[in-house]
Amino acid sequence: MDKAIFLDNAATTRTDPEVLEAMGEWQGDNFGSPATLYAFGSQAKQAIEAARQHVADLIGADQKDVYFTSGATESNNWAIKGVTEALAEKGKHIITNQAEHHSILMPCGYLQKKGWEVTYLPVDSDGLVDPADVDKAIREDTVLVTMVHGNHEIGTIQPLAEIGAITREKGVYLHANAAQSVGHIPVDVAALSCDLLSLSGHKFYGPKGVGALYIKRGVRIVPLLHGGGQEKKRRAGTHNVPGIVGLGKASELARKNLASEANRLSTLRDYIIDKIEKNMDDIRLNGHRTRRLPNNVNVSIEGIEGESIMLSLSYPTAENARPVFVSTGSACVSGTLEPSHILLALGLPAELAHGSVRISLSRHNTREDADYALDSLFAVSERLRSMSPVYKRGSKQCASGSSGEGCDCEAAS
Ligand SMILES: *Cc1c(COP(=O)(O)O)cnc(C)c1O
């Protein structure tokens, strides 16, 4: 990893050394279970409660409302399945949007098979949900609105506070999937008026396999996991003590560094976007230009496959001696090259949806890294385009900003 430039931080981040150090103690001599009553275990219990306070402070919550889980996937599943089951008598309708993460879409699909109705609201060409659409979609039998806060693929930040004001007024629960935003931009459960909120440790320099669900006091929800009495009988299973301590440390560090880090990264993000737009023809910025996570860049490069770019960048060659790791919205999953549902929801024509590259930054990335990665990206794209049977320079399939004449994006959206 020394030489490599890791620009796939929306997928996962490197655990901070201070987090590793904090966890170390709980992986060695101090192995007691927090559930035991003798003093050895009670230290673990104290460590867990201290971590809970740090997580709560990061999201403006009461520590009593923070429940530890195995990550955002579990938190999302718990929020959706737990609330719908608890409120099944009130109604069987929930609302989400078309550009969600699979850990939201799959539980929604599961509920549909069990007789629930799910409204998937559209997003505009920047990936934004219109709060007025949420307002219109809420019915008598609606029990939950679940909305991502920061989109993992295109970085667009949803107007959650506006949506929260609507759900609050109508007496419908709002769940926020904040896996990408917590630790990167200010997140305050009261300001967002959300009733439930999911977060994940490894998305902000904490350990993998640990996260939390914020459940506002009084919210009706049934457990996902039944067993022991942990987490006030709401989430059974022996606590992942090192993971929870690590999540607490990551939360503490994030709170301390958030403003300066968000500032630095959004400057670097805009520098990258600007340089791509100046150096490449026939590209499109995906996601909103300003209402955007500080660490996310996503562009479609016309005429070539995102997967080819991703793979070419990841192997050292004459063009790029240092491997560069990025992501694409068109990865070859189980043999089929399907563009991501998120890019399709923006209204991108398939050719552009296939050519997407996501660059996601971390606190470890420098401007020098970015310059190196961009030079590699330009060289690789030029080579792939020169071999592409479909690419015609200047075809204006969809110029950046998607307002160009003859732009198929607009027509398709
Ligand atoms: C990473 C991510 C998840 C899943 O989180 P895990 O902790 O890895 O299960 C869910 N939603 C979004 C938006 C994410 O970025």
Image (tube, grey):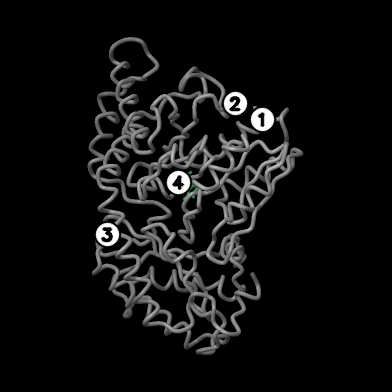
Q: Are marks 1 and 3 in contact (CB under 8 Å)?
A: no
Between discs 3 and 4, the one toward the N terminus: 4
Q: Residues within 10 Å of mark 3 (few under 14, many from 20)?
A: some
Circle 4 sits in a helix, a strand or a loop, which is it? loop
Q: Residues within 10 Å of mark 1 (few under 14, many from 20)?
A: some
Q: Are marks 1 and 2 in contact (CB under 8 Å)?
A: yes
Please, is residue 406 above or below residue 339 in the view?
Answer: below
**Residue at the disc numbered 4:** 179
Taking the image as shown, residue 411 lies to the left or right of residue 343, namely right
Q: Using the image, tell me which numbered label, if any, was put on residue 264.
A: 3
Q: Quadrant of residue 125?
A: bottom right
The kind of residue tagged 4 is: Ala
Q: Are marks 2 and 3 in contact (CB under 8 Å)?
A: no
Distance between mark 2 and mark 3 Cα atoms: 41 Å
Between discs 1 and 3, the one toward the N terminus: 1
Q: Using the image, tell me which numbered label, if any, was put on residue 222.
A: 2
Residue 178 or residue 187, whichever sits in front: 187
Q: Using the image, tell me which numbered label, if any, was put on residue 85.
A: 1
Residue 340 point in image, percent of width and height: 58, 62
The kind of residue tagged 1 is: Glu
The kind of residue tagged 2 is: Val
Q: Quadrant of residue 341?
A: bottom right
Please, is residue 320 above or below residue 46 in the view?
Answer: below
Between discs 1 and 2, the one toward the N terminus: 1
